[in-house]
Image (cartoon, rainbow, N blue to C red):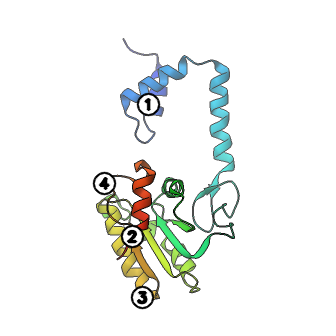
């Protein structure tokens, strides 16, 4: 049985979301159609409100409703330590460990020449500007443990070390090919504690 055009369009729209394949998109679409109109209006309003209110921190690149974000404006954070991550969700993963008390820098991805992502597509100029005043003594590179993440880490080490800033990387123990977003707090906390210099 074929779905009506509007249902097919909804499934197609949902399948454009990351990690959502055709079957999951179909299940989501049918679930949404089973909800009341008021529930759907609330979901849509919540999404639009988030889109209207959320921006990127001008300092670190994290998602925020205030600029600078809560971490960058917290005077208790260690300003001599910056943890560079690929995406905003990686900040949330590291914060859940309650082990890290420094600042962050969201790169906006990882180097991937095959996907057309070179140094110019990452927030490297902003990172270099933050390191230029000499206040930062260590940069922790917390990229995902995969080819792109490791390439980005090595690139950052070569770029940053001449500035006299210590460059470290999370300790291994994280699954190779995995994402920080899906790593449990204990494993991620131990990886932070056992980081090593690149």
Residue 7 percent across, percent down from the top left = 48, 21
Label 4 – label 2 distance at C-alpha:
15 Å
Q: Is residue 62 left or right of residue 90?
A: right
Q: Earlier in the sequence, mark 4 or mark 3?
A: 3
Q: Label 2: how many residues lie within 10 Å, few (<14), some (14-19) or many (20+)?
A: some
Q: Earlier in the sequence, mark 4 or mark 2?
A: 4
Q: Earlier in the sequence, mark 3 or mark 1?
A: 1
Label 2 sits on residue: 195
Using the image, tell me which numbered label, if any, was put on residue 24.
Answer: none
Position of the N terminus by quadrant: top left
Residue 192 percent across, percent down from the top left = 43, 65
Is residue 50 placed above or below 35 in the rendered structure? below
Label 3 – label 2 distance at C-alpha:
20 Å
Marks 4 and 1: in contact by CB < 8 Å?
no
Label 3 sits on residue: 162
* Callout 1: SS: helix
Q: Label 3: how many residues lie within 10 Å, few (<14), some (14-19) or many (20+)?
A: few
Q: Looking at the image, is mark 4 or mark 3 nearer the viewer?
A: 4
The tally of labels here is: 4
Q: Earlier in the sequence, mark 1 or mark 2?
A: 1
**What residue lies at 35% left-to-right and 66% top-to-bottom?**
171
* Callout 4: SS: loop
Label 3 – label 1 distance at C-alpha:
49 Å
Label 4 sits on residue: 175
The answer to whether residue 116 of the structure is visible from this angle is yes
**What residue lies at 33% left-to-right and 60% top-to-bottom?**
145
Label 4 – label 3 distance at C-alpha:
30 Å
Using the image, tell me which numbered label, if any, was put on residue 12.
Answer: 1
Residue 117 percent across, percent down from the top left = 38, 63
């Amino acid at each position: 049985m074929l779905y009506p055009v509007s249902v097919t369009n909804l499934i197609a729209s949902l399948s454009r979301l990351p990690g959502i394949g055709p079957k999951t998109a179909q299940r989501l679409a049918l679930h949404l159609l089973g909800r009341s109109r008021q529930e759907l209006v609330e979901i849509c309003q919540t999404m639009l409100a988030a889109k209207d209110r959320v921006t990127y921190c001008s300092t670190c690149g994290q998602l925020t409703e205030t600029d600078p974000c809560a971490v960058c404006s917290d005077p208790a954070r260690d300003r001599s330590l910056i943890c560079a991550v690929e995406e905003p969700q990686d900040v949330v993963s590291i914060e859940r460990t309650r082990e890290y008390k420094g600042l962050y820098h969201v790169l906006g991805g990882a180097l991937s020449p095959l996907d057309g992502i070179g140094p110019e597509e990452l927030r490297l100029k902003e990172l270099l500007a933050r390191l230029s005043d000499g206040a930062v003594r260590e940069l922790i590179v917390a990229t995902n443990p995969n080819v792109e993440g490791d390439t980005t880490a090595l690139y950052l080490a070569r770029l940053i070390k001449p500035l006299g800033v210590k460059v470290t990387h999370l300790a291994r123990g994280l699954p190779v090919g995995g994402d920080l977003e899906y790593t449990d707090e204990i494993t991620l906390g131990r990886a932070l504690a056992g980081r090593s210099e690149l």
